[in-house]
Image (tube, rainbow, N blue to C red):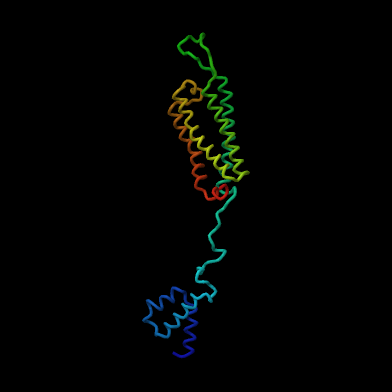
Amino acid sequence: MTREELADLSKLASTLSDEDLEKAVTVDAGDYDPQAIAVFRAEIDRRKSPACGQSAAMPPTGGPAESEPAVKSGVGGWLLYFCIGMIVAGLIEACNGLVLLLRGNQVVFPLMPGLPQTSQLQVPGTAVVVIGATGLAFGFLGICAAILLVGVRCHEVLRGVKAYLWARVAWAFLPVILALTVPNQVEPLGLSVSESVLDAVFSLFYPVILLRYFSSSERVRATYL
């Protein structure tokens, strides 16, 4: 093989991809003479050497632009949406709880149903008042929790918010307990046992979804831990 042919072969080798060069010296080695194989191997060795501009410890595609993205932190993305949702839901619950409080003070129930109506001692609708007061409290706490998540970034805030959400899980069963123990007092709310169970199931979605997110989100971990 002449010097010009070797030069042309070197130019050809420089244009081939790494996969084509490896194939030429292995699978297709029988199609080339020993000098051509030597040229291909020399090109492979040249590309693997640090002098080619790529360190052996650095992958060919490495670089600042292609490095793994940093974990996002701060109040944004789903965390921001959840905070806004907590404020909106808190306002709705607080208003609903206030309405129930006012309504419960207007509804009275007989202490001893067996006595004639004229002899009855009347008491306020305690069950309605309890549901209204707890709804007002949880609505207010939800608003405070969202504001703290936005303004204070520390582990204690996240732990307090999780405690609030676990308390909401327990609170979801309050209408069921009242419907089983004092059914006559929740009748003004239109709550039977089956309806209160269904209401409890739907009430669980909100805290359970948030607990799942706050426990698994990389953004939450980077922001508050």
The image position of residue 218, as x and y in percent, is 52, 50
- The quarter of the picture where the N terminus appears is bottom left
Can you name the residue that lies furthest to the front here?
156
Can you name the residue that lies furthest to the bottom here?
2
Query: Residue at point 44% right, 77% down?
Result: 21
The image position of residue 204, as x and y in percent, is 48, 36
Above or below: residue 162 compared with residue 51: above
Above or below: residue 7 compared with residue 122: below
Above or below: residue 26 compared with residue 120: below
- Horizontally, residue 53 falls left or right of residue 41, namely right
User: Which residue occupies the foreground of this view, 154 or 182?
Assistant: 154
The image position of residue 17, as x and y in percent, is 47, 74
Above or below: residue 64 compared with residue 51: above
The image position of residue 103, as x and y in percent, is 57, 23
Query: Residue at point 53% right, 27% down?
Result: 131
Number of disc labels? 0
Can you name the residue that lies furthest to the right here?
151
